[in-house]
Amino acid sequence: MNVAGRAIAVLALACIPALAQIDPAGEWAPRFHEDQPERIPGPEIGDYSGLPINNAARLRGDAWDASLLTVPEHQCKPHPSDYSPRGPANLRITKVIDRDTQQVVAYHTHISWEAPERTIWMDGRPHPPEYAPHTWQGFSTGKWEGNMLTITTTHLKIGWIRRNGIPRSDRATVVEHWIRHENYLTWVVIITDPVYLTEPFIRTTDFVLDADQQIAPYPCEIVEEIERPKGSIPHHLPGTNPFLTEFATRHGLPQEGARGGAATMYPEFRQRTAGHPAVAPQPQAPAQPAAPNPPNGELHVLKVQGNVYMLVGAGGNITIQQGRNGVFLVDAGLAPMADKVFEEVRKIAPAQPLRYIVDTHAHSDHVGGNEALAKMGSTIAGGNVVGDIGRSAGQGATVIAHDEVLNRMSAAPAANQPAGQPAIPFAALPTDTYGGTEKDVFFNGEGIQLLHQPSAHTDGDTIVFFRRSDVVSTGDIFTPERYPVIDLQRGGNIQGVIAGLNLIIDLTIPEEKQEGGTMVIPGHGRLCDEADVVEYRDMVTIIRDRVQNLIAKGKTLDQVKAARPTEDYDPLYGADKVWTPDRFVEAVYKSLQASK
């Protein structure tokens, strides 16, 4: 072959796609020859067959009531990306091409049912840090493995394995495979969930190429479907769901098989239960909680939106607002972390002075840095104040808190701190307090509301709402990685926690599909939005209702603990070694007894 021929051959090879890659882009229609009853009319109540679930997931399903979907906060939630292909869903897959390199940067999907939009990044970018927000579609990256596109997804919101109450946690990792054979696309989903599954769960969905389909818009408007008391969450109390046996009875199945679990998925199970249709479920060891990552002394800053940032790793989360007037902090973290906190603040706002610190409550992981950080700041003061006191009036940032926080922090050490610890220094106390329900501040071009929630985490809790940035900082009323701490000695109460969570939901407005919009910085844990608070509020309300029901039956505290009213939520929220499920249940019990 001459030189020209070889050049033409090289050019021809360069135009051939990478080995065995088959482009999945196009318009696809779903095939319903498999799992049609689950995907169209919906799964039956109590049908957990074929699912490798643990007892916690089973109990979540038993408590689920379909009327939950009529609650306004639940009406416009879309299917998460690991479930959305299951619906009556026409699918559009498009390529995102880099103009300069002509490489595929990403694939984008749009599904007709509820119109979820998803991006699968193909450019090798890393997944976000653990404290980043979670979404219904999660964060997805893809790579080719022969003719199969493999997709890994993290940062998903809590979803479902089967939409009859069987949950999938927000700690799950999902691996998907797209396999195209001419005009057919097979979508394989593999879910690994350390909270609710005992082994990976695999399912497949098939599509056929349909170039002429039309996908209409899918707007969703929240309406008042059922009139019920505000904050009421439909659910079945333990042992009261009358529908759980109907599925197995209707289809002539052993009840144990309908209850799910990895053992029911193998041939040996059929042999073991042959001739025994009413075998009771075998007891399972409690699932081990998935522990949140412990603090490692490193600080991380995440831009939230508007003028607001979230700082993680200094004890409790710290909210930072910055602008032309200076820096405004919500909480100050642990005392030993103050210098590092100030270094991070300086990176965000190198020239602006620290003007304000708001204490959301009196615990040391939120107020410990008060003294050191306040000294690094300056107060806006002048006129008679400086004339009467001198220039020292402007030294130090203003520390704002509710009256009850000052009362708790200035109380005798025995009433405020563990035995043997010294009293809080005077310089660490709030310098500006407010009583009642609210204090307003206008700073850096936006209104900031300080909202007191009485008798919640403590009796001095403040929720901070940055109105223009559209960010809510909650303090420890909302901590999505653990059960809410109810500090009974400092005036905490379960009813106040639920009222505080409902107040946060009232303040937040999602952008679309119950996602985004108003962002929520919790006292501990990852950045959230309204849907995350709703999930947490539902959990706390359901557990309150269970304990209240047991109290009404005359049960003692020990009997309530023995009933394990938190069992189905323990793998998700029960990993804290100090604030254990038993301590949480005891605080709920005593709160309700005190209310009586």
Image (cartoon, helix red, strand yellow):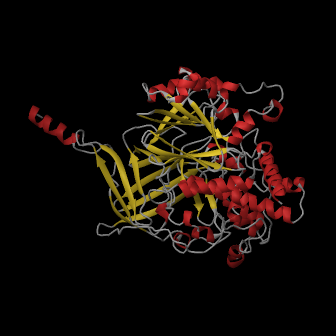
Measuring from the top left, give residue 163's x and y in whole percent. Answer: 59, 65
Residue in the image at 50% along x and 61% along y: 79
Residue in the image at 80% along x and 30% along y: 413
In the displayed structure, 245 sits above or below 548; it is below
Measuring from the top left, give residue 110's x and y in whole percent. Answer: 38, 59
Residue in the image at 44% along x and 56% along y: 511
157 relative to 484 in the view: left or right: left
In the displayed structure, 343 sits above or below 95; it is above
Taking depth in this image into account, of 67 and 509 the one nearest to the observer is: 509
Could one spot residue 426 in this view of the protein? Answer: yes
State the quadrant of the C terminus: bottom right
Residue in the image at 64% along x and 60% along y: 51
Q: What is the count of numbered marks?
A: 0
Taking depth in this image into account, of 87 and 554 the one nearest to the observer is: 554
The quarter of the displayed image where residue 541 is located: bottom right
The quarter of the displayed image where residue 385 is located: top right
Measuring from the top left, give residue 149's x and y in whole percent. Answer: 41, 48
Taking depth in this image into account, of 310 and 62 the one nearest to the observer is: 310
Measuring from the top left, give residue 135's x and y in whole percent. Answer: 50, 51
In the displayed structure, 211 sits above or below 202; it is below
The quarter of the displayed image where residue 332 is located: top right
Q: Residue furthest bottom?
A: 250
State the quadrant of the N terminus: top left
Could one spot residue 481 in this view of the protein? Answer: no
515 relative to 436 in the view: left or right: left
337 relative to 269 in the view: left or right: left
